[in-house]
Amino acid sequence: MTSGCHLSRLPSQDFRFVQSAQFVRRLSDAVEQRITEFDGFGEPSYESIQIEKLRGSGRHRPANRSKLIDAPSCQTSVAYEDVDYNRGSLQSSKRSVNVAGQRQDESCVWSNATPAIVERQLMRILAVWDNETEAELIEMYLGVDENEVTMTSPAGLGAILESGQPIDIVLMSIELPDTDTGFGLFERVIERYPDTPIVGTCSQADVFQVVRFMANGMSAYVTRDLAGDYMFMLRAILKSTLDAVRAAREKELAKKLREEVESVRKLQESVLPKNLVAPSGYRIAARYEPAQIRVLDGQPVTLAGGDYYDVFTLPDDSLVVLVGDAAGHGMKACLSIMTMHTLVRMMRRHEYMDTAHFVDEINKGLCEQATVTEKGGFITLLYAILDPLKRTLQWSAAGHQPPLLQNLTTGTIEPLADEDAGGLPLAVDEDAEFESYTCEIPKNCRVLFFTDGLEEAFPEGDDEDQFGVEGIKRTLAECADLSLDETLARLFDASDQYTQGTGRTDDTSVVILECRE
């Protein structure tokens, strides 16, 4: 390159590795490749490359490829534009720099041109290099996408490491000036930035030395050719390496999150009763399934849930059945349910024969728990006591749907009360009042207690079309001659199939109590 070349930040002398115009031609080709076409409205894209490194001042965007100056003396040119946002128009003065260093100007105006902003993830790059000429060119080329490039020599590396500035990726030669010295600097970098990917470069003769670097944490390497073509690969290699490292970390994080959620889910399921004991003449069965989601790698994640059921016997042989559902699902819902479970276990030692009184005490206790009440949290609850001898069921609800009674003799399936019987959920108002309801349980019948995850199953994108209470009734009618376990399985399967393969988006609990003649 001759001294007539007017690129203010490019060195104008001592291009030992550039023969005649070969390197400039490659640089021009690379820049032109990065220039984006105008869209259909003639608006320049923000995705176009930044040429600040070429002139050092001003706000610059590349010219449209179709507008490159056609000057006979400029057989290879680098075009850029000075942008002035003035009165709604984009005034651009384009200049080209040719191999011989001649410069020509051309001005033009695009009216109503507004740059379209394209978001992209920039890189903060630390480059350690010992060849000043190459260093300036590499810094320029790595920075054309507005990446933050910190270029330093081996002597200046210590100050950079001590500063602790944030770095996304490191580019360094392993020959600084030899591989032993380079390895020492590599160890210093990896000690300071242990989680930051490092990309090394080396000559073809020293490729065998790369093994030592790769074995100690280097992420990738590039071989250097005498013509300098490797420089045009650096930005793409750095980006692909950084993307691969980030993807691997996200996958590992997703795995750890699944493990954490699984441990909490198992803790939650551990409080559900395993062996349900029913009074003489009765049978009981229960089942719980948490919601599922899919994460970025397509792996299903079984969430910690906000559903709960319990079955236990009081000293007078009465049977208690309760189901609860915390708002939402996930960690907070699970913690809310665990808090309620603790209160229930503490209070079951006292004989609360009035179900409304029991629910009232639970509500007051939960209203004092920030774990439940923060961010508008609440829990719905249905609490019931069966008198097995009188065949009566007393129950109270807090924002929960009433049980369904299936008469196996007549075939009727009806709720035990209107939905208005539910009242307010728990942890909303400590002064809330709850009602007790008592009904007779006929022989040869079933009582279904359930959370809304069963009825609110719907196909993806159509939450108005739900499985509903009618779907539950229809399935119960089909299962009148089946065992309780088979009936539970059919209920869950029918609800799940209704989603057309997407699965239920909410936790689901079901308890079935059966009275036979």
Image (cartoon, rainbow, N blue to C red):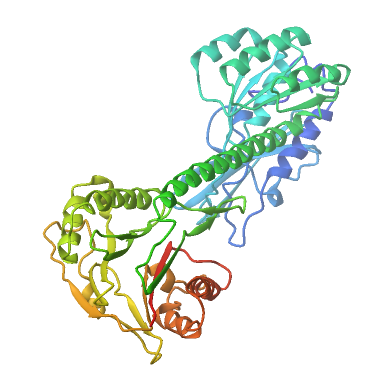
Nearest the camera: 488 or 375? 488
Nearest the camera: 99 or 115? 115
In the rendered image, residue 132, in percent from the top left (x then y), is placed at 70, 14
The N terminus sits in image quarter: top right
In the rendered image, residue 81, in percent from the top left (x then y), is placed at 60, 41
Is residue 12 something that shows in the picture? Answer: no
At 11% from the left and 59% from the top, the residue drawn is 431
Q: Is residue 441 above or below residue 77?
A: below
Nearest the camera: 44 or 382? 382
At 37% from the left and 58% from the top, the residue drawn is 308
The C terminus sits in image quarter: bottom left
* Residue with the most extreme bottom position: 410
Is residue 21 something that shows in the picture? Answer: yes
Q: Is residue 86 above or below residue 76?
A: below
Q: Is residue 42 left or right of residue 360?
A: right
Nearest the camera: 306 or 124? 306
Q: Is residue 308 above or below residue 20?
A: below
In the rendered image, residue 372, in percent from the top left (x then y), is placed at 27, 50
* Residue with the most extreme left position: 431
Q: Is residue 355 left or right of residue 259?
A: left
At 53% from the left and 66% from the top, the residue drawn is 503
